């Protein structure tokens, strides 16, 4: 099995061989601080901060952010994600839906992206809270479109229906990595369960586009990525995002191989061949990166 590009064999080489296409300039300007101040005003968590997203400064400069609902402690400890882990996280904050809605309004968001920590401690997996957020956002921002990025709800289809019945414009659930690496990289979530949730979402969604994302750089082969894309297409995904994994902290999985821009372009072209409505592929692509632009490309 051929690995993507060059496999880095030791930690010292990994530190010294950071490729140029994974370097970028940070934007500057007052908009970054304005975005931060609005989020602080409403005491909101974002996946941008909690997951140490490399795009957060760029997005803040454009007055966009991805809200992280249901607290900032997750009941799962995936090896790729730096969000805090807790078996007993705090109860959902009842006023969080309206705080998110008002923040979205003040930021002027025309496309609101809401993600969540996994809440396996809750009977409804947190689905009713997400429903209330969607309703509040629609009330405060009637012309905005909504994208939700959820957990697998532990396979609970009633929880899935609770969210889909609110008709978010995009329903997103990430497969994260290839089948072989899933047991090593994800905690509790399985490759098969993700495909199940996506296929059920496609069947049950009234007006929602179905979206999923893949990380590369964890030691997968190029063919394994193609296999995952085929599986996502069969499951009914309309949109696929493919980005480069970057180790958020020393405690998390290390980058095993650096994937060059030409390979990302091959992924994009393969997505076109498979018939996805849109394949967004590049080193800095993340599930919610440029989400408004992706939605616009698909719907216009």
Image (tube, helix red, strand yellow):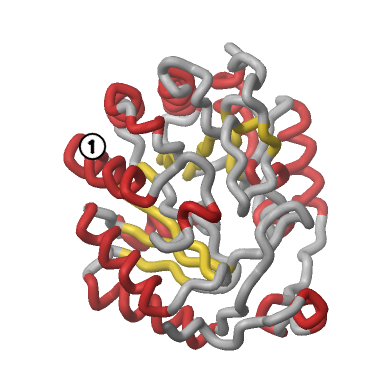
Element assignment for label 1:
loop
Quadrant where the N terminus lies? bottom left
Q: Can you say which quadrant of the picture contains the C terminus?
A: bottom left
User: Closest to the observer: 181 or 268?
Assistant: 181
In the rendered image, residue 62, in percent from the top left (x then y), is placed at 65, 54
Q: Nearer the viewer, residue 102 or 79?
A: 79
Residue at horizontal 77 percent and vertical 31 percent from the top: 40
Q: Is residue 105 left or right of residue 48?
A: left
Is residue 197 rendered to the left or right of residue 2?
A: left
Q: In which quadrant of the rendered view does residue 12 lie?
A: bottom right
85 sits to left or right of 154? right
In the rendered image of this protein, does residue 36 appear above or below residue 234? Answer: above
Can residue 256 be seen from the camera position used here?
A: yes
Residue wearing tag 1: 205
Number of numbered discs: 1
Please provide percent x and percent y for residue 120. Answer: 49, 25
Q: Does residue 38 lie above or below 253 as drawn? A: above
**Is any atom of residue 144 visible in this view?**
no
- Determine the residue positioned at 20% across, 58% down: 234
Residue nearest the viewer, comparing 66 with 267 = 267
- At horizontal 77% and vertical 72% (from top left) the residue drawn is 25
In percent of the image, x 28 and y 57: which residue is there?
Answer: 238
Residue 157, percent across and down? 28, 28
- For label 1, the crowd category at 10 Å Cα-Cα, with few meaning under 14, some 14 to 19 and many 20 or more, is many
Can you name the residue that lies furthest to the left here?
Answer: 203
Question: Could you tell me residue 50's position as x and y percent?
Answer: 70, 42
From the viewer's side, name the closer residue of 221 and 201. 221
When asked about the image quadrant of residue 298, the answer is bottom left
């Amino acid at each position: 099995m051929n690995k993507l590009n060059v496999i880095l064999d030791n930690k010292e080489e990994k530190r010294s061989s950071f490729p140029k296409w994974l370097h970028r300039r940070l934007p500057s300007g007052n908009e970054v601080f304005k975005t931060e101040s609005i989020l602080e005003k409403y005491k909101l968590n974002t996946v941008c901060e909690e997951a140490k997203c490399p795009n957060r400064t760029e997005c803040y400069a454009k007055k966009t952010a991805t809200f992280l609902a249901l607290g900032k402690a997750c009941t799962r400890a995936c090896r790729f994600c730096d969000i805090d882990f807790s078996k007993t996280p705090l109860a959902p904050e009842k006023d969080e839906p309206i705080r998110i809605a008002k923040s979205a309004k003040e930021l002027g968001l025309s496309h609101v992206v809401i993600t969540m920590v996994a809440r396996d401690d809750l009977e409804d997996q947190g689905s009713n809270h997400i429903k209330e957020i969607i309703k509040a956002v629609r009330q405060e921002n009637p012309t905005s479109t909504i994208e939700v990025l959820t957990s697998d709800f532990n396979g609970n289809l009633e929880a899935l229906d609770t969210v889909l019945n609110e008709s978010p414009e995009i329903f997103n659930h990430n497969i994260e990595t290839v089948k072989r690496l899933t047991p090593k990289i994800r905690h509790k979530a399985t490759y098969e369960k993700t495909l199940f949730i996506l296929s059920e979402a496609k069947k049950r969604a009234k007006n929602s586009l179905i979206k999923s994302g893949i990380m590369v750089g964890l030691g997968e082969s190029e063919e394994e990525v193609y296999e995952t894309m085929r599986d996502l297409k069969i499951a009914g995904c309309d949109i696929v995002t493919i980005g480069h994994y970057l180790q958020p902290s020393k405690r998390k999985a290390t980058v095993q191989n650096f994937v060059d821009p030409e390979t990302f372009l091959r992924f994009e072209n393969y997505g076109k061949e498979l018939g996805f409505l849109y394949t967004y592929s590049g080193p800095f692509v993340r599930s919610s990166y440029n989400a408004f632009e992706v939605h616009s490309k698909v719907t216009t």
